[in-house]
Image (cartoon, rainbow, N blue to C red):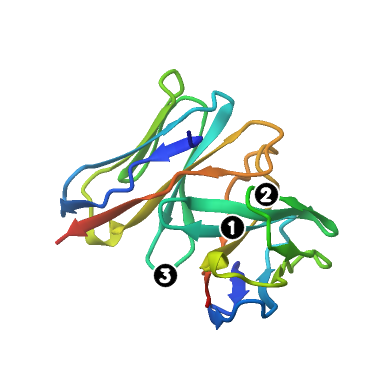
Amino acid sequence: EAQVTQNPRYLITVTGKKLTVTCSQNMNHEYMSWYRQDPGLGLRQIYYSMNVEVTDKGDVPEGYKVSRKEKRNFPLILESPSPNQTSLYFCASSLRRPGRGASYEQYFGPGTRLTVT
Amino acid sequence: QKEVEQDPGPLSVPEGAIVSLNCTYSNSAFQYFMWYRQYSRKGPELLMYTYSSGNKEDGRFTAQVDKSSKYISLFIRDSQPSDSATYLCAMSPQTGANNLFFGTGTRLTVIP
């Protein structure tokens, strides 16, 4: 089954304790992306990756890191989480990046609800 | 001003009603327009996708794009309780985009 998986689904942590949210896709997609979703603000892109070892900042990258060492995996790292990073996080993947062909369907993971106290 | 504006609702309708969901945008470079549906505790899933202006129909769903007014709509005919979800519009320019620009979502409840 084609899917994007994220782990963990729920996480409560304290300020400053480093954490990693994993993301994996089994569709051989080139493009992967992380979003955060907040009430009244919608989905905002944090980082994206156009292929292995190619990553770049989205709209709200501060406080986050990513890596893309393998095509299927795109972990999101919070080195020193703060309460303003409490949010619902989604990983997404698509065959190509937006603007390149008709493959606009981004497949989203189930989400990770993060609470930083 | 946000690039994409969407009324957050919530919107409650009786089963069988016609539903109209809308977004406006400010960037005239947007060429690709999408509607995503997001059920509670799930990630968004692509519902409809259109390029440039015009209409596209898929079963009970019709997407309309009016580029002259920078306005897009999603119509749902014969709405069902299973349509209860949050609907997100998204759009992108033709080239040079690394991102989709999302609306904040409209929460729809269809009452049996």
In the image, taking residue A25 as reference, residue B7 lies left or right, namely: left
Discs 2 and 3 share one subunit: no
Name the residue carrying label 1: A35
Of the two numbered discs 1 and 2 on the same chain, state the one appearing first in sequence. Answer: 1
Crowdedness near tag 1: few (<14), some (14–19) or many (≥20) residues, C-alpha within 10 Å: many
Circle 2: element type: loop
Distance in Å between CA atoms under marks 2 and 3: 24 Å
Dot in front, 2 or 3: 2
For the residue pair B55 and B43, the one nearer the viewer reads as B43
Residue A116 relative to residue A62: left or right: left
Subunit bearing disc 1 = A
User: Which subunit holds the residue at mark 2?
Assistant: A
Q: Which mark is residue B41?
A: 3
Seen from this angle, which residue lies furthest top? B68
The correct choice, above or below, for A22 with respect to B85 in the image is below
* SS class, disc 1: strand
Q: Chain of mark 3?
A: B
Where is residue B105 shown, x and y percent of the image?
A: 39, 49
Residue at 48% from the left image edge and 37% from the top image edge: B2
Q: Residue at x 51, y 35 (%)?
A: B3
Task: Please identify the quarter of the rendering in which residue B24 is found.
Answer: top left
Residue B48 or residue A32, whichever sits in front: A32
Which residue lies under the disc numbered 2?
Answer: A58
